[in-house]
Amino acid sequence: DLTRVRLLGGPLKHAQDLDAQYLLELEPDRMMAGYRLRAGLEPKAQGYDGWDAVDGRQLTGHIAGHYLSAVSLMYAATGDKRFKDRADYLVSEMKVVQDKQGDGYLGALQGSRPGAQRNPTGETRPEDLIDGKELFQRLSKGEIRSGGFDLNGMWSPWYTLHKTYAGLRDAYRFTGNKTALDVEIKFAAWAEKILAPLVDEQIQRMLNTEFGGMNEVLIDLYGDTGDKRWLDLSYKFEHRSFIEPLERHVDNLNSKHGNTQIPKLIGSGDRFGFTGTANDIMAAGFFWDRVVQHHSFTTGGHGKDEYFHEADKLDAVKDGRTCETCNVYNMLKLSRRLFEFAPDARYRSEERRVGKECRSRW
């Protein structure tokens, strides 16, 4: 268990100290600005910019989720109460926002109307922006405009919300914050209500847009609560057109966006751990083998610009945009999960190989 291990020195301790310093320099109130705005509350600080910008078609809100996971894990790894205080504060702020929303929703997203225009700086015009909560309600009524990274005018919205779900899960698991679990349950109930009116064909069309590890967090919520409704809800995020060929041992990775696909299989592996469903481990295991043995460079990374290419023909795509960190992180996560089920040395050797490459780059 992470709480039973302490780094005492060397390069890993140095890296941990730098990470801790960075986490303490960030400001939770800035991360919560978009959440408060969407709920009709006055922000306590100016929001961060970039992908977490509060105005425009961004991934607004995902930084708070990532950060909540980070400080929760850092607390478990160090025992430093400052990180638990950060986690507790963020959870309390999320609860305030969720209570104000009134229906369990907890997001900071905005989207754009169909045919929205952009101003000369490339930003969506303010009059064309719509609150993400409204766009999810339209989704619930069967309005589904879904592409690789766009769902109803929102940029990978389930992917973004997944980070908040995961942060709440980690705050509960690694700091013992029971309010985090309560907030996560209400948030999951909101998702359950949004998806309930949709038939299977509509759900599958929705899943053509990147949705992160939504299946994984719902399976983990089942594990944390024992409530089967969350296991059932996890199947709403089962992207069958991608998963079922893997169950049949068909390599369908060519031209697929890597970091969109890997979390789907992490979820499959996670569900196998709770249910023992054979198809889940068949898909996850076959996917891992194909990526590692047929789609990876000697460094352990894979893909170009996060995309898979033709198996065993990687020379033509090697350049400075391979081995994307998001892909590497998720493959390491999948490797660890599979090793738990089958302690085969190949999973650990792959983790060491990729980890060594990442350390040399960083």
Image (cartoon, rainbow, N blue to C red):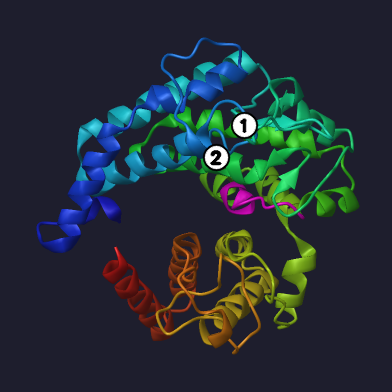
**Residue 168 makes an appearance in the image:** no
Furthest toward the left, the residue is 9
The answer to which image quadrant residue 275 occupies is bottom right
The residue shown at (78%, 64%) is: 240
- For label 1, the SS is helix
In the displayed structure, 313 sits above or below 348; it is below
Q: Amino acid at mark 1?
A: Phe
Closer-to-camera residue (203/209): 209
Highlighted range, magenta? 208-218
Q: Is residue 354 above or below residue 15?
A: below
Q: Give the residue at mark 1.
A: 187
Q: Residue furthest front?
A: 120
In the rendered view, tell whether residue 13 sits above or below residue 49: below
Task: Report if the CB atoms under discs 2 and 1 are less than 8 Å apart.
Answer: yes
Callout 2: 10 Å neighbours few (<14), some, many (20+)? many
Residue 142 rendering spot, x and y as whole percentages: 89, 38
Where is residue 12 drawn, in percent x and y? Answer: 19, 60
Q: Quadrant of the N terminus?
A: bottom left
* Residue at figure coordinates x 59%, y 28% from the top left: 108
Percent x, y of residue 96 = 51, 16
For the C terminus, the quadrant is: bottom left
| Residue 44 forms part of the magenta stretch | no
Residue type highlighted by circle 2:
Tyr
User: For the point 50% across and 44% down, which residue is it?
Assistant: 166
Considering the numbered disc 2 on the image, is that residue within a helix, a strand or a loop? helix
Residue receiving disc 2: 165
The residue sitting at 64% across, 17% down in the picture is 101
Q: Nearer the viewer, residue 238 or 271?
A: 238
The location of residue 325, given as percent across then percent down, is: 44, 62
